[in-house]
Image (cartoon, rainbow, N blue to C red):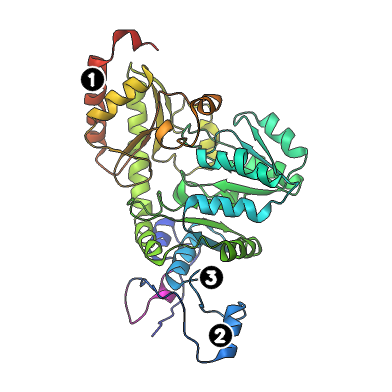
Amino acid sequence: MNRKQEGIKMNAHIGTKSVWAGEKEFRVFGGTQVPVIMSVAYDYQDVDEWYDVALGLKPGYTYNRMSNPTVKAFEEKIRMLEGAEAAIAFSSGMAAISASLHTFLKPGDRVVSVKDTYGGTNKIFTEFLPRMHVQSVLCNTEDYAELEAEIAKGCQVVYLESPTNPTLKITDIERLAKAAKAVGALVMVDNTFATPINQNPLKLGADLVIHSATKYLSGHADAMGGVVCGAAGLMEKVYHYREINGAALDPWAAYLIIRGIKTLHLRVRQQTQSAMAIARYLQQQPLIEAVNYPGLETHPHHDVAKRQMNGYGGILSVVLKGGMEAIKLMLHKLQYANRAGNLGAVETIYGPARTTSHVECTLEERQALGISEGLLRISVGIEDTEDLIADLAQALAHVEANLPVSTHNK
């Protein structure tokens, strides 16, 4: 029995939406949680009804590559959190990004983006889209004159990421969305770092919002997924691309992400508070050359972040004097840390760009993007702030004691 009830109101607060949105109509047998429906196909006694469902004329399910009840519940939840008309889930964040770009770009088209996107996204722009004869123009992230001039030349897509991974630069989404609309371009925004808790790009003029659901939405580093949100008409096109190309989200992963989203607002709140405290602490440390965190008043884009974000997020990056040698010493000594290529989990995660966000890039490519070998990304977990700072203090003391004096000022 499917006990359908009135859905949660769109004007509910974000924490309430995180818990309740998109769930009630998918519960069965009186259960209080969305079930995991693993069936690959669905049985129809009436062939005409089967045909109507297959064509989308009636609601229902036919085959898991097309749709699945558990996946649909996840899509409904994130749809409401982002304030979108529709959402389409994918098997990974990169699948969501790739599908979005390939859905709306064809040979001869032009896409304008920034140089500071995630390394995998950058590879799409520099390696894969050119094979399709799509021109990718990557501008300096902080140069609005360059961005607006390139957009004004004409393009089909403007792709943004804010905050950027791992440099934590902030892009004025509303400003660039206006420039894009003037030439009829679609605006896509990777909102993974900010999450729907701290930023809603659709309200700022974006057309599509993309998440690696593997990160904050899941929050527990045990499920991989991606999702795209936007207007219903646009999502129909994205859905068709996924339906044919096949990067559908697994129902079990969808269930785990749904479970993770229930605590999203609590996790992000703690992570944001700790990230700010850690950023201020690291600013005072002699071994730290730079701290990248948009919540700091010294951040070059702090005013934009303050205007378009509800919070500054749980990610920061630092540049250590002594480069990779200093990073190796520090990572070895940390106690409350996973040294891994992930972010947004309940545990704190450390990783240099060369093994995480830009592992696909060569040293020369990273240097061209302004990513030094001494850059270390910190994804703050939900541990007690005081313990994380104490852990950093003892790790930095270890670096100070063991790093050759000649490298301290490099």
Q: Marks 3 and 1, Cα distance to the nearest angstrom?
A: 54 Å
Q: Secondary structure at mark 2?
A: helix
Q: Is residue 358 above or below residue 9?
A: above
Q: Nearer the viewer, residue 347 or 44?
A: 44
Q: Position of residue 5 (x, y in %)?
A: 43, 78
Tell me if residue 163 can be seen: no
Residue at label 2? 50
Report if the CB atoms under discs 3 and 1 are less than 8 Å apart: no
Farthest bottom residue? 46
Name the N-terminal-most of marks 3 and 1: 3
Name the N-terminal-most of marks 1 and 2: 2
Q: Position of residue 16 (x, y in %)?
A: 40, 61
In magenta, the rendered stretch is 23-32
Whether residue 33 sits left or right of residue 64 in the image: it is left
Name the N-terminal-most of marks 3 and 2: 2
The C terminus lies in quadrant: top left
Mark 1: give few (<14), some (14-19) or many (20+) Cα within 10 Å. some
* The magenta stretch spans residue 295: no
Which amino acid type is marked by label 3?
Answer: Met
Q: Secondary structure at mark 3?
A: loop
Residue at label 1? 397
Whether residue 213 sits left or right of residue 188 in the image: it is left
Q: Is residue 238 above or below residue 179?
A: below
Seen at 54% across and 38% down, the residue is: 117
Q: Nearer the viewer, residue 337 or 366?
A: 366
Residue 66 disc label: 3
Seen at 38% across and 85% down, the residue is: 1
Which amino acid type is marked by label 2?
Answer: Trp
* The magenta stretch spans residue 28: yes
